[in-house]
């Protein structure tokens, strides 16, 4: 009887739950759900913060089982390392990726587009002009240019596109006059030209038209939005902002040396450096090791105030510099940024010292500034100023130095340069410490 009741209870309790779970599973079946298309906007400069945003967006799309990922491109380009990071992430995902060039995919933007599975163009879209340049706007060295050219060609070939056009985007020696890129000019494809050479799958007027062309008219559209922290990180990791942050940081800390205590300049300097690390941490470049190195460097420099020798300060400075390179992820960019910050700081120090006449308060604590002058009561030896005006007799010939008897005291004396014979009367005219100057007395 008891066993029968247990069976009945088991059936009444677990069968409905099993039915609900099964029904719930059927409702979540991807085959029954609407397909999802993830839209990720790439606007303005390509930098490390953008790479972090795209990585997060693709991860979310993968978790939601998105059908396709669309990168809507409207960028003039940006940092090569950030573009390579984005391309690597695009090639890792199993979801089909689409580049929608609306309105431009220039330089690093063209490279990102070439690393997607298909490229669609807005009628006014352009793509190309991808020569690599440095932070000062000059053409990069041959080594960097060769690397970037190989990356562009490889991206085109890996997606079954004619690599000659990708090469013409970075090498002005490639001659394609029919597309407005003769020798000495870089290739920039219009929408019609991209369609002609096979770089564009189709030309679409807007997102709706693109979805239609993809055969996903009933798909759910998900817009990946950038968070506030990612917006801040994008700004703080901009190639132009980095040297500004480092310059403000170093200037603030140097100006703090001119003021007593810890005030606004020091706070400004530390805030700038913290913003640098925050931006690179959100962007995924500054890990815990970089922050530990930075903090350790600061502590060692503080310890230098109490430990003689200078070794702690030197190690602390090296630790801070290494932490900046570790956080950056781009050695060349960080080197240039540090050089800019160094020159700006030196200029400020010159202005403070030479123009404004300021002196660092900090060094007053470790440099001896007091002088042992006579005015302050310091004497290096006994002064015989009481002998001035006294008369005596030369006990020896003075040539010009010798010995004289003055007030029954034998004293070493010196003349003003003339010769005084033995036995002549002399007079003390001045004393300079222990040096007693005499003159022959003519009566």
Image (spheres, rainbow, N blue to C red):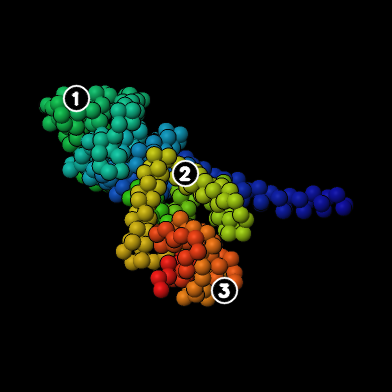
Q: Residue at x 83, y 50 (%)?
A: 4
Note whether residue 375 is visible: no
Read off the residue under disc 2.
Answer: 325
* Residue 34 position within the rendered picture, expressed as x and y whole percent measured from the top left: 42, 45
Disc 2 secondary structure class: helix
Residue 199 vs residue 22: left or right?
left
How much space separates mark 3 and mark 2, taking CA atoms? 79 Å
Disc 1 secondary structure class: loop
Read off the residue under disc 3.
Answer: 407
| Mark in the foreground, 1 or 2 | 2
Residue 410 vs residue 350: left or right?
right
Note whether residue 5 is visible: yes
Task: Check disc 1: other Cα within 10 Å, few if <14, some if 14-19, many if 20+.
Answer: some
* Residue 440 position within the rendered picture, expressed as x and y whole percent measured from the top left: 42, 67
Snapshot quadrant of residue 354: bottom left
Instruction: Note whether 92 is above or below 361 in the view shown.
Output: above
Say whether marks 3 and 2 touch (CB < 8 Å).
no
Instruction: Note whether 16 is above or below 89 in the view shown.
Output: below
In this view, the residue in front, 205 or 350, is: 350
| Mark in the foreground, 3 or 2 | 3
* Residue 261 position within the rendered picture, expressed as x and y whole percent measured from the top left: 51, 70
Read off the residue under disc 1.
Answer: 173
In this view, the residue in front, 39 or 384, is: 384
């Amino acid at each position: 009887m008891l066993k029968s009741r247990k069976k009945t209870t088991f059936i009444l309790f677990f069968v409905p739950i099993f039915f609900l779970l099964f029904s719930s599973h059927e409702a979540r079946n991807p085959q029954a759900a609407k397909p999802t298309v993830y839209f990720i906007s790439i606007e303005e400069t390509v930098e490390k913060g953008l790479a972090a945003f795209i990585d997060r967006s693709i991860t979310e799309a993968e978790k939601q089982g998105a059908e396709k990922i669309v990168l809507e491109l409207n960028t003039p380009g940006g940092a090569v390392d950030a573009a390579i990071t984005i391309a690597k992430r695009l090639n890792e995902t199993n979801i089909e990726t689409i580049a929608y060039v609306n309105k431009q995919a220039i330089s690093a933007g063209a490279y990102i587009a070439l690393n997607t599975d298909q490229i669609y163009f807005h009628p006014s879209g352009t793509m190309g002009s991808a020569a690599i340049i440095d932070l000062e706007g000059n053409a990069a060295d041959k080594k960097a240019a060769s690397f970037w050219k190989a990356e562009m060609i490889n991206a085109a070939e890996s997606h079954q596109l004619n690599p000659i056009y990708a090469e013409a985007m970075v090498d002005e020696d490639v001659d394609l006059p029919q597309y407005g890129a003769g020798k000495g000019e870089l290739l920039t494809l219009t929408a019609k030209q991209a369609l002609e050479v096979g770089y564009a799958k189709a030309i679409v007027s807007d997102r709706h038209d693109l979805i239609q062309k993809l055969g996903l008219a009933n798909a759910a559209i998900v817009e990946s939005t950038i968070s506030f922290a990612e917006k801040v990180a994008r700004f703080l990791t901009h190639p132009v902002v980095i040297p500004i942050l480092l310059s403000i940081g170093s200037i603030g800390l140097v100006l703090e040396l001119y003021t007593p205590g810890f005030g606004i300049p020091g706070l400004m300097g530390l805030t700038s450096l913290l913003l640098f690390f925050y931006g690179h941490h959100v962007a995924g470049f500054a890990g815990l090791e970089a922050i530990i190195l930075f903090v350790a460097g600061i502590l060692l420099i503080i310890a230098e105030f109490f430990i003689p020798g200078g070794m702690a300060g030197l190690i602390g400075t090296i630790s801070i510099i290494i932490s900046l390179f570790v956080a950056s992820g781009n050695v060349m960019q960080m080197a240039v940024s540090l050089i800019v910050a160094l020159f700006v700081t030196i200029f400020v120090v010159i202005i403070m010292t030479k123009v404004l006449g300021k002196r660092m308060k900090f060094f007053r604590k470790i440099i001896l500034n007091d002088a042992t002058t006579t005015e302050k009561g310091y004497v290096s030896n006994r002064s015989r100023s009481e002998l001035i005006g006294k008369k005596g007799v030369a006990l020896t010939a003075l040539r010009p130095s010798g010995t004289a008897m003055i007030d029954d005291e034998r004293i070493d004396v010196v003349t003003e340069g003339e010769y005084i014979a033995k036995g002549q009367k002399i007079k003390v005219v001045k004393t300079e410490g222990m040096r007693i100057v005499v003159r022959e007395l003519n009566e």
